[in-house]
Amino acid sequence: MTEHLEKQQPGWRFDNSYAQLPEAFYSRQEPVPVKAPQLVILNDQLAKSLGLDAKSLRSESGTAVLAGNRVPEGAAPLAQAYAGHQFGHFTMLGDGRALLLGEHITPQGERLDIQLKGSGRTPYSRGGDGRAALGPMLREYIISEAMHGLGIPTTRSLAVVTTGEPVYRETVFPGAVLTRVAASHIRVGTFQYAAQWRTTEELRELADYTLERHYPDAAAEADAEVGGRYLSLLREVIKRQAALLAQWQLVGFIHGVMNTDNMTISGETIDYGPCAFMDAFDPATVFSSIDTQGRYAYGNQPQIGVWNLARFAETLLPLLHDDMEKAIELAEDAISQFAELYYANWLSGMKAKLGLFPLEQEEEADEALIKELLGLMQQYRADYTNTFRSLTIGDYEAVLSAHGGSAELGQWHDRWQERLGRQPESAEAARDLMRRSNPAVIPRNHRVEEALEAAVEHGDLSVMERLLSVLSNPYAYTADQDEYCMLPAPSSQRYRTFCGT
């Protein structure tokens, strides 16, 4: 039995609006206490932004909360129910090893979920132990914070605590609990669960709650329209996801497991399992060991995104219109907007990566110029991030070398320089735009593995801390980032990632 704190020393301010939904959407559950919790890493910058006292979080009582051994005052722990299409197959899911402590209200009035991941068995564990291993929790910490540094909407990581207990997978690992912060944990899969197993009125309650929490302005403006507030909800989620997926593509991020339960209604990136960043540019790149068919390959992510959104639209049909044919028509029209929204985000982002200013100055040949460069990068297996980095700092020789000294690249470079010369902005303004659009560093796979090995195998957090420091401002172009731009040594083994989070 977990004990409740008498004081909120770190500054927790919990409210529990999700718990006011029908109980069918969750199961009340307290975390399962662990043997010997020890704080591994705390995100001081995030704690400060949340209005929390880092010193109190580092204390024995603060660590007990982060481990799930104590429940802070005002929290109301629960495991959320949801369903999802996993690699295209629909199934019942839910928080099998995570608990939502509640919603913390920041000093700025922002409402954020505080979730413990690896906190023990729940009614949705489906035979699992409800625990998590240290390595995957640290991996989520690194990648989620790197995404935040890149300016991409994401859940965040507040802390990782070891449990003092082993976790048994293919071998024995040290157990850990991650504290995750999110705009919310409402997923496409949450709506799929409601549509499949709950009443229309319960589905409506979920939709109304989601609108008020994430899209209050859209809700207020849409009531008089055919399809009303629920069509507005669908459209807003489509907009958010179109923008998010374009941002993934622009930095070479591969999520790895884009199941519908891993797609948030808020538009944040969530669930950093077998994710990784692409080195050599290739749309067919897959890292996940379980994605044997390449369903979630880099080049497929936009199509999977719209497929997931279609599943979301299906759940809303009873709310869109009493006439099912009309409801389907409204949903299909909304979904059809995704491609244009996504492509506009991607194209403007790619233009910025090449120093080309907004769409109103677009030339017909811009799209071809972008696609030609990507084609050359794929042909010569040039590194995606370093190609744009080198173009940004004017290191044409590095780009040429990566492309085997090809004459085609030289011709492309001449056309690009001519195009830059035709826009009214100065060359300096174009370089500034490129620096803001092209990260100098990403969490390279070999650097992430290096940090995890040092932390898990040797208890050395310094490698991870330095990596996190470099990734916190990836657009800085400072000298201390240079070594993190280096590619891994050639290997005959393809890099693979695993679903450990």
Image (tube, rainbow, N blue to C red):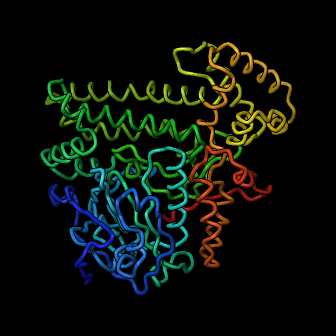
Residue 460 position, x and y percent, is: 63, 75
* Relative vertical location of residue 341 with respect to residue 124 in this rendering, above or below: above
Q: Residue furthest bottom?
A: 35
How many numbered marks are there? 0
431 relative position to 472: left or right: right
Residue 329 vertical placement versus 279 (above, below)? above
x 30%, y 71%: residue: 122
Q: Position of residue 75 (x, y in %)?
A: 24, 68
Residue 378 seen in the current view? no
**Residue 414 found in image quarter:** top right
For residue 87, side relative to residue 251 (left or right): left
Q: Residue at x 26, y 41 (%)?
A: 315
Residue 89 showing in the rendered view: yes
The residue sitting at 57% across, 15% down in the picture is: 362
From the viewer's side, name the closer residue of 398 and 139: 398
Q: Nearer the viewer, residue 225 or 66?
A: 66
**In terms of depth relative to the viewer, which is nearer, 37 or 50?**
50
Query: Looking at the image, is 108 positioned above or below residue 322?
Result: below
